[in-house]
Amino acid sequence: MIEDKNLEWKEVKCQHIVQDEYIDFRRSDYLLPDGTVFGPYYSYSRRDYVVIVAIDEDGKYICVKQFRHGIKRVTVEFCAGGLEREDGKEYGDRGAAGKAESALDAAKRELMEETGYESDDWKFLLSIPSNPTIADNYANIFLAKNCHKVSGQNLDDTEFLNVDLYTKEEIDALIEAGDFPQVSHVMALLLAEKN
């Protein structure tokens, strides 16, 4: 058995396969704890993002329907989106001060842009790696209660989505049917239920 402190791998080679304003997709070789070098391991950088469990004044969950190109179908999920960065990139050093808007500001902006709803009752629930096996970005989970409609949508050029309201039971049925498939969104619902 290896001591926990000796489990870390050391990157010995890194090739940036795609590195543009949207993604940094890498191929790396690592020195493993037993002294061997192995690769390739693929990973990518994307910007941190927010997921908002938004509940209206009647207790309904505010969700969006949109096409997800990874699974090539329309899904239901909570409002979500990336933290906007000053440099315009979709990824970068998350520890660099002043490089990105705050997670709460991003959550408020995304809720307003995607749904036209706002709230004065926000609670931060968790910041968690989105997929630590292959990605280095974090999901920041928020709960917004007593949301009320104040405007129409203000969508980005590539956003085509509909807003729908659901009961908790309806979302549970969507999850069971595979129509609410975002893992971080399911986790966000479970966290929100505890608050």
Image: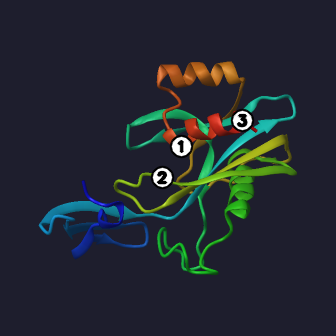
Q: Which mark is residue 130?
A: 2
Residue sitting nearer the eye, 50 or 20: 50
Amino acid on which the number 2 mark rests in the picture: Ser
- Residue 69: x percent and y percent? 40, 43
| Label 2: how many Cα within 10 Å (few below 14, some 14–19, many 20+) | some
Which circle's residue, 1 or 3, is located before the other in the chain?
A: 1
Structural crowding at the residue carrying mark 1, measured as other residues with C-alpha within 10 Å and reported as few (<14), some (14–19) or many (≥20): many
**Identity, as a three-letter code, of the amino acid under mark 3:** Lys
Disc 2 is placed on an element classified as loop
Side of 37 relative to 105 (left or right)? left
- The mark nearer the N terminus, 3 or 2, is 2
What separation in Å lies between label 1 and label 3 (alpha carbons)? 16 Å
Quick check: marks 1 and 2 in contact, CB under 8 Å? yes
Which residue has dot 3 on it?
A: 194
Decide: few, some or many residues near mark 3? Use Cα within 10 Å; few <14, some 14-19, many ≥20: few
In this view, the residue in front, 151 or 11, is 11
Residue type marked 1: Ser
Residue at x 61%, y 73% (from the top left corner): 100
**Colour scheme of the picture:** rainbow
- Label 1: element kind: helix
Q: Which residue is mark 1?
A: 184
Q: Position of residue 41 (x, y in %)?
A: 22, 60
From the viewer's perspective, is the residue at label 3 or at label 2 nearer?
A: 3
Q: Earlier in the sequence, mark 1 or mark 2?
A: 2
Residue 79: quadrant of the picture: top right
Q: Residue at x 60, y 64 (%)?
A: 83
Q: Visible in this render: residue 95?
A: yes
